[in-house]
Amino acid sequence: MINLIATAESENQAEALLEAGVDTLYVGGHPFGLRLPRPLDLDEIETIVRMAHERGKKVTVACNAIMHNEQVSRLGGYLSRLAEIKADAITIGDPGAIFTLEQMRLPLPYIYDAETLVTSAEQIAFWVKRGAAGAVAARELTLTELEEMQRKLTVPVEVLAYGPTCIHQSGRPLLTNYYHYTGLKERADKDRGLYLRDPKNPDSQYPIFEDEDGTHIFSTEDLSLMDQLQELDKAGLHTWKLNGVLLHGEKFTAIARLFAAARDAVEDGTFEPAGFSNRLRAFQPASRPLGTGFYLKNPDDVK
Amino acid sequence: MKIQIKKPEVLAPAGNLEKLKMAIRYGADAVYIGGQAYGLRSRAGNFTYDEMREGVQFAHRRGGRVYVAANMVTHEGDAAGADQFFKTLQAIGVDAVIISDPAMITICFAAAPGLPIHLSTQASTTNYKALEFWKQLGVARVVLAREVGIKEIREMRRHTDVEIEAFVHGAMCIAYSGRCTLSNHMVNRDANRGGCAQSCRWKYDLFEIDGNTAKSLIPEDEEPFSMSAVDLSMLHHLPDMIEAGVNSLKIEGRMKSIHYVSTVSNVYRKAVDTYCADPEHFTFDPAWDDEIWKVAQRDLSTGFYYQVPTEKEQLFGKPRKIPKYTFAGQVMSYDPETKIATLQQRNNFGVGEEVEFYGPGFVHFKQTVRDLWNEDGEPIDRAPNPMMTVTMHVDQPVEPYFLMRKK
């Protein structure tokens, strides 16, 4: 069974995504969840969980921040509330958060998500031994590696099927610092829509923004594994995330609907990638090229 | 009120055996080195097992310790042979290994039980619960993320007694260590496996997309966007670090020179000893600062220890002018009767130049080169050949392994 996960930015979009055929919604907010389309508070999350459960669907809540003392000291209360409202799972990347969860013995499964650091089956096995119910694989892995990892593991390994991936998190306000240096009067938040370009690579355009967790830089491409969905399924990689951190409202929901239809086709054995890919290209914003990132590279190409 | 402190370790980097010995001679309590595999500095001079053996013996005879960094974030297959690696390190007598990858931790526990593990800064440990997690697992020490402030360290100390190591000096990642794959995405080099291309220090355009056209935000004639951090130095704030309960003060730089490693170790040794001998009456000696600037490569700052770094802690505009000193020679022997020193040349120098000698224990003095002889006792004007042996008059006594620098 394929698990199609999509980020949700609001109660409205959550409802639309459930209608679209998404299996699991991914939500969260500051100060515990990283890089979400919109931070949601506990009341909103509670509504979304209820909505999902009514339809037999699930909700995972992001608790994957790199936590400082202040955050980790408040985490316990947040986790208790998530357990009360019956969130189905949380993502965690900080061992301090895992320690907190262990001590509290809450009925709240966690999925290990330390982003760039999750690169082998043995690492994931370490966290499974400490209670992890799954893991989010680093986006810098090749399909060859992902397939081998999943083969060695009993828990699901999540791959990014669609969307941008974060390639840099700084604790510093890098845009604000630059603005101060140059005297620019500018915004640094996500909605401002700013990009970096490496002059040596004219095609590069890396989205950049600041929030409470620091500065985040994303990949030039929106990853899309639409053409590889059949291979993912064959490789035993059944957990697919669609990340809408930079794409809002119906634009993202339409893409989620398309992936849900693709999932159905893969499960029915009727999947034809060309048609789906063409439709995806029609939905895709002009400013965001589609690509396959590291998935189709040879593991030896990246050293 | 009496200040309660525990004297911390001064931990220096050593890119090769010669640097290891210098770091120990110049006052480091411990050094960290890399092996032939599993590290993050593929371009540093990494140690063979024989060199490690010699380094460990050298350090242990002088009461020092040697840690081996194996802090790569492994992909499938990368950890092959790591069990044998850890076993060999344990047999050699290495004092600890520095690891960030849980897969490597698992292997190390199984293959070399009893070999202490230090959790690398690559794991970005930023809270006391994480310290407790690693302690319960059996990790002996945690190297904190560079994003942790002094107040946070004090709070960590109240919650846990696990050993804390923190950076006090050197270059810094601008990202949370381990959470940056700019190199991977830009040049197919894996930052977490030793391939970091330092893409953060490049220059970038910053722009918005208006319709279908990119519109740059960079003001005309203005500095492009960049993310380059100035270096860290906590030399002026060691009492804060020590009173907060940091057990090991880490100096960055396995790629750095002998000149750098000896100088920085010497300064931190002296400052830590001075403070710990009499914390109540400690005063900062400006000579320590002068000395540090002789090997500084960038401007210096206190990183995240007191505040979130501003634009002043990034390299924008013209870099600060730092007087450049060159490592010119190493003392091999000295004859107090004739006041003649024998030196091994490390960079071109000659008669008439003002040089500076320095030695362990923070000994320094200036000297003008009045005369110079080659190996055959013939007078020469300059010492142009790398590693050539020369003799010269030195007015104050020097000892083997004193070093000579020039401006």
Image (cartoon, coloured by chain):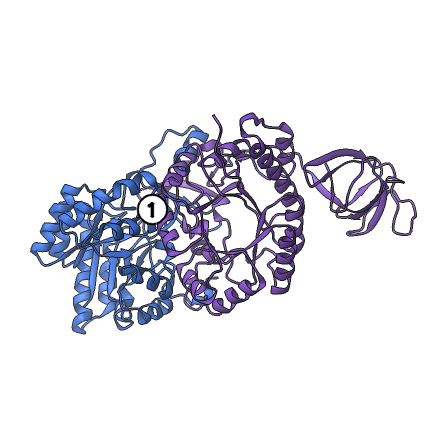
Chain colours: A blue, B purple
The quarter holding residue A272 reads bottom left
Give the camera-side residue of A36 and B116. Answer: B116
Question: Residue pushed farthest right?
Answer: B378
Q: In the rendered image, which quarter contains the N terminus of chain A?
A: bottom left
- Going 85% across and 40% down the picture, which residue do you hit? B336
* x then y, percent, for residue B44: 59, 55
Q: Name the residue under label 1.
A: B129
Q: Can residue B215 be seen in this view?
A: no
Q: Position of residue A64 (x, y in %)?
A: 29, 49
Horizontal side of residue B247 vs B19, given as left or right: left
- Which of B218/B232 is in front? B232
Q: Which of B268 and B316 is in front in this view?
A: B268
Looking at this view, name the residue that lies furthest to the left.
A54
Q: Which amino acid does label 1 sit on?
A: Lys
| Whole-percent x, y for residue B256 in the image | 61, 48
**What subunit carries mark 1?**
B
- Total marks in image: 1
Give the SS element for disc 1: helix
Say which of A252 and B324 sits in front: B324
The image position of residue B105, as x and y in percent, is 42, 60
Query: Taking B353 as reference, is B163 above or below it?
Result: below
- Looking at the image, can residue B267 be seen? yes
Disc 1 residue crowd, few under 14, some 14–19, many 20+, Cα 10 Å: many
